[in-house]
Amino acid sequence: MKNTQTHVAYGIATGLACIIFALLLQVTGWATKSNAINYVAYVIMLIGLVMNGNAYSKANNANVTYGNIYGSCFKATLIIAIIYLIWGTASLYIFPEMKTKVLEKMATNFEEQNTPEEQAQKVLDMTDKYWWLMVTVGSFLGSIITGAILSLVAAAIPNKKTASNTL
């Protein structure tokens, strides 16, 4: 039996919600002020994946397994990652000052942590040199890894029919 799929709609909706949040952080300047607020994007992603898992289970009358739901959530994660890749690339052009702000924040953190100047400069130079790669590929891979972990959690939540439920 082929299961009804829900990952496309929820992947797109969740990806867009995460991008809107990231855009708000950039516009307000909070993106470089606080590291903690950036974790809210993970909460948004988890909520979207849980909603996808629940919709997938409901669309298939709970005749699904943990693995089925995980697969649907991971497919949604791949869509989210593609949206992040597009956003990462676009943000390089929309917010060119982001690179300077991030490098300044890194330099300040290195000073506060008493990092040796030579070591700090190497990291700053590498970040400067590979900025484009870090933003695009980093956001893509980061969202896949995070999404895979969050999908494990999201797949455990929806209702599933088991052999004992059908007797």
Image (cartoon, rainbow, N blue to C red):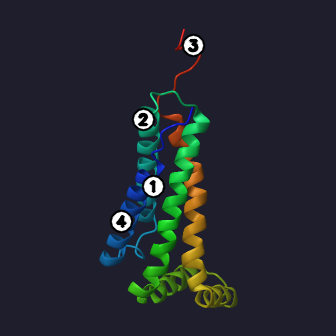
Identify residue for label 1.
11
Instruction: Indicate the quadrant containing the C terminus: top left, top right, bottom left or bottom right.
Output: top right
Q: Residues within 10 Å of mark 4 (few under 14, many from 20)?
A: some
Identify residue for label 4.
21
Of the numbered discs 3 and 1, the one sitting upstream in the chain is 1
To which quarter of the image does residue 93 belong? Answer: bottom left
Position in image of residue 164 (x %, y %): 57, 13
Could you say which disc has been placed on residue 122 in the image? none
Identify residue for label 3.
164
Measure how far apart labels 1 and 4 are at the Cα level.
15 Å
Of the numbered discs 2 and 1, the one sitting upstream in the chain is 1
To which quarter of the image does residue 127 belong? Answer: bottom right
Mark 3 residue element: loop
Identify residue for label 2.
59
Position in image of residue 39 (x %, y %): 46, 60
Does the image show residue 126?
yes
To which quarter of the image does residue 70 belong? Answer: top right
Q: Amino acid at mark 2?
A: Ala
Measure how far apart labels 2 and 1 are at the Cα level.
16 Å
Q: Residues within 10 Å of mark 2 (few under 14, many from 20)?
A: some
Residue located farthest toward the top when viewing the structure as drawn: 167
Q: Amino acid at mark 3?
A: Ser
Of the numbered discs 1 and 4, the one sitting upstream in the chain is 1
